[in-house]
Amino acid sequence: MGKKRKQGKEKLDRASLASAIMDLFARSSGQAFSIKQLAKKLGLKKKADVKQATLAVQELAVRGKLRQLANGSYSALQVLQEAVGQVDHVSSRFAYVEIGPDQPDIFIKARDLGSAFDGDTVRVAIFPTRHGEHPEGKVIEVIKRNRNRFVGRLELSRNFAFVKPDFKKIHVDFFIYPENVNGAKTGDKVIVEVTAWPEGDKSPEAKVVEILGKAGENEAEIHSIMAEFGLPFRFPENVIAEASAIDAGITPDEIKKRRDFRDVPTFTIDPEDAKDFDDALSFRKLENGNIEVGVHIADVTHYVKPGSSLEEEAFDRATSVYLVDRTIPMLPERLSNDLCSLRPVEDKLTFSAVFELDKNANIINEWFGRTVIHSDRRFTYEEAQEILESGSGPFAEELLALNELAKKLKKERFARGAVNFETTEVKFELDDKGKPLAIVPKVRKDAHKLIEEFMLLANKQVATYVYNQKKGAVRNTFVYRIHDFPDPEKVHDFAIFARQFGHDLQVEPHTISRSLNKLMEEIEGKPEQNVLQQLAVRSMAKARYSTEEKGHFGLAFSHYTHFTSPIRRYPDMMVHRLLQHYLDGGGPVNRAAYELKCEHASEREKRAADAERASIKYKQVEYMTLAEDREYDGLISGVTEWGVYVEIVDTKVEGMVRMSDLDDDYYEYDEKKYRIVGRKTGKVYRLGDRVTVRIKKTDIDRRLIDLVFVTPKIESETNRKTEPKKRKSRR
């Protein structure tokens, strides 16, 4: 009891001291005091009292009431407000806390992050001071850790080890006691789990929980990317067992419940290396001269039942992930490559959208429901394209007719205001050990666009059908794919930047789509094409899943969903179930529950995209490590206060020229004009400038390429006439 009373007294004394300390600062406006000075002013003489005062000051600093100055003394800070957000630790010197889409990000100095890491959800105190355009603040509480496992390279010393993290937004090493190394050797890629979070400038303590392999080896590096983003390495045994137990047979009773398309010419068109075929097209001419096109989608929800282990795993993963050298599927292979894959010359269960189209691709009739099909042929995109170009081959009549309809659908879509956001993507030629031999651009031809147009048609019409169904005054709950209208300020900034290249962009709401398409046509094949395409995409809102119908700006559809890929997307499974529910006459379902599922799917989609980009970046860095030492033509693709990003034209690989390597002058960062300027020489490096670079260093662990300029570019201030508008937020 005595011990408890003593602890309570210490807490009471410290609270009283904290109150007295803040009163002292309130009476001494603008002054700073050291601990010794505070103790003297408060009349504290006993060591125990001074210790309590020291602890009280430290707690007040953590809570954002006081700030420690460079000389060790403390000053009071007036807190305007508190906010909750997510840490974006962009530099070893500072971070931002992202509060929300309509709020400016909060600038946080590294020393004011406390133990917060990138991605953590934190509470921040916001101060009257500002850092440029951003409010400044201090982390006062870590509300939720983003993760407690990290990936990196292990280095062993005699008495301890440390792990240097791969993720470039983690700016500290992890300290490992010898007993927690668990057999890992120097140079191993490992997964560590944090056992103690840091305070101040200390490193987190951790233990090795898995050894991925030697750094630099393909398997170790890809596994490290998977671990970095929390992607699963394998399916749980109970999920595999459940998938294996599914009866593959299609009974006569099941066929009777469905519309039978097995006698209608049907085929699939997919990439050459595809193993799961989740969509097929059927084609037949009708007696009235119209054409019936069936868009047939694998009936995944026939096999994956609510409440099953397969369902829970599919929901958790939410999407398949496509890394450079492998796929991490949403469903086990038994389903994705067997039962649900629309393989040729096999009867398959499908969920279909069937359209009667006239010669101008107008929809005369439509039907949605469960079907059974028999695919006659599996085409690769290359095979289908050859038939479209030559006019002869298997199903040539059907393919040519479908291609004509697809072109009319596309023309009508763009006439309504769809935006052409086709950016240049690359693919890798790999050897049998995963080493990149070449980087080549992906080329989209008519065969790709044919499939795309009919998938878009099915997605749009399914969403429109459900939207128009009502039970009284209440609309049916549904899962939509929405894309908001772009932020006017972001579009205005982009228009100003595009003008620097001689392109005029009209930003009025009724002209923005047409003007963007005109710009995309103007820049095709020009050096600035990729930079402007990427910036145009960044200026747009992000597409996401929602039960709230807001339409799809990019596609110019009033209603849109994802119906066509349930093998690899969980939202499509939700759409199939909801559509069948409404076809059966069911009423509206719980909107709040489905909105939570939509948010989860959107988050998982972002994780997948980030992991896919990381795998591409790893292979790009690896390729440039093996590339010859020569000069490369590049375009400046980004400008920051710590360096200039340059995209190499030939390979689309991006690297950075660090500020510290620009030793011909002292360069100042001009955030408003997307540039850096030499203080003495007036040299300017600006977004979109053409430059020549060499590779200085590659770092596979952190997937970084350091470049140096070969011939610095000099531009006068009169070369550019316009300036970007001031932004409220860095994003």
Image (cartoon, rainbow, N blue to C red):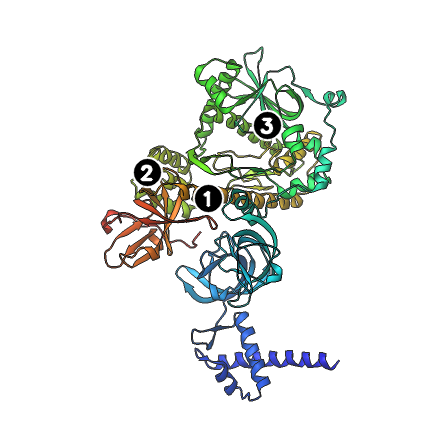
Residue annotated with mark 3: 277
Mark 3 neighbour density, 10 Å: few (under 14) some (14–19) many (20 or more): many
Looking at the image, tell me whether mark 3 or mark 2 is earlier in sequence order: 3
Please tell me whether mark 1 sits on a helix, a strand or a loop: helix
**Residue 269 percent coordinates (x, y):** 54, 24
When the figure is inspected, residue 709 is found, relative to residue 267, above or below; the finding is: below
Front residue of 444 and 233: 233
Q: Mark 2 to mark 1: distance in Å? A: 22 Å
Residue annotated with mark 1: 617
Mark 1 neighbour density, 10 Å: few (under 14) some (14–19) many (20 or more): many
**Residue 659 percent coordinates (x, y):** 34, 56
Looking at the image, tell me whether mark 1 or mark 3 is earlier in sequence order: 3
Please tell me whether mark 3 sits on a helix, a strand or a loop: loop
Q: Mark 3 to mark 2: distance in Å? A: 37 Å
**Residue 667 percent coordinates (x, y):** 30, 57
Residue annotated with mark 2: 527
Amino acid on which the number 3 mark rests in the picture: Phe
